[in-house]
Amino acid sequence: MSAPRVLVTGGAGFIGSQYVRELVRGAYPEWAGAAVTVLDKLTYAGNLANLEPVDGAYTFVRGDVCDAELLAEVVPGHDAVLNFAAESHVDRSIASAGEFVRTNVLGVQTLMQACLDAGTPRVVQISTDEVYGSVDEGSWDEDAPLAPNSPYSAAKAGGDMIARAYARTHGLPVSITRCGNNYGPYQYPEKVVPLFATNLMDGRTVPLYGDGGNVRDWIHVADHCRGIQVAAERGAPGEVYHIAGTAELTNLELTRRLLDALGAGWDRVERVEDRKGHDRRYSLSDARLRALGYAPRVPFEEGLAETVRWYAENRTWWEPLKKRTEDAA
């Protein structure tokens, strides 16, 4: 595909904006020179400041993936559509699930229908390892049964099933990617890495759920986006592709690494009641995607150090976001 037209929904969020920045800077040679459209509702987590480094290199449309009339105008003419649009914070889904179901299920259906109507040649639905629930040992492959435990993961599973149904029923050329916990620059500071890092920078405590023994698979957002691109370029319609990370850590171990990176001690850790329905462990097998040529490139230690430096050097980006969140609490 030469100089494709690419629509990125949710492209002003954390992962979506990373993908857009990489794409327009030429990080994906097969799509060099792509004409990029970003569609984003600009909810609390959508932020055009995330795209400031590539201002002028994309077309922006403010809108909702649940708006069928808007999608009927925007989607036609694009060679590829990548759906990053999602509500993604588990704690928020526990407190109020409705918006998660709306965006993550109805939004996917509305977008898939628009792509079908427009004859879009390539579609990618970006999802999460959380749709599988918890795994005590080993790793999930792409054929593992879905068993989500939070309203967030249940809504993502619902959207994935809608995407799969459009592939199987209508022949829509959509692939699904699932990934572990992301970290990196421009991540909204309610998520654990930026929350802990920025709290520690401000001399505050950090909240550690339960016994800290929950295990997550960590991946740098740049590696995640490269995996998505491999699936977009070479993935088969209707297939699921896992994008595994480079570090499987307990939350206790992650906390220790962040404390060390910021020169803080365990006295800055506040033990809090565990999250409801907190999955114990996630782990993905990514053999299917590796067979297409993917492998992560960012070692966790290096990526975490760079991420902490980014937050230290970009207070003007995150301080207003944290203040807005705290004022709304």
Image: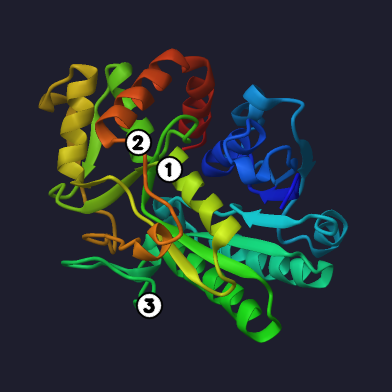
Q: Is residue 185 above or below residue 245?
A: above
Q: Is residue 7 left or right of residue 248?
A: right
Label 1 – label 3 distance at C-alpha = 23 Å
The picture places residue 220, in percent across and down from the top left corner, at: 39, 39
Query: Taking the image as drawn, is residue 272 in sight?
Result: no
- Look at label 2 and name its amino acid: Val
- Look at label 1 and name its amino acid: Asp
Q: Earlier in the sequence, mark 2 or mark 3?
A: 3
Q: Are marks 1 and 2 in contact (CB under 8 Å)?
A: yes
Identify the residue position indicated by label 2 in the image: 298
The picture places residue 29, in percent across and down from the top left corner, at: 61, 40
Secondary element under disc 3, as helix, strand or loop, is loop
Q: Going 71% across and 53% down the picture, which residue do you hit?
A: 1
Residue 306 found in image quarter: top left
Q: Earlier in the sequence, mark 1 or mark 2?
A: 1
Identify the residue position indicated by label 1 in the image: 223
The picture places residue 129, in percent across and down from the top left corner, at: 38, 61
Q: Residues within 10 Å of mark 3 (few under 14, many from 20)?
A: few
- Look at label 3 and name its amino acid: Asp
Q: Going 67% across and 45% down the picture, which residue do you hit?
A: 31
Pick the residue in front: 256 or 167: 167
Pick the residue in front: 230 or 109: 230
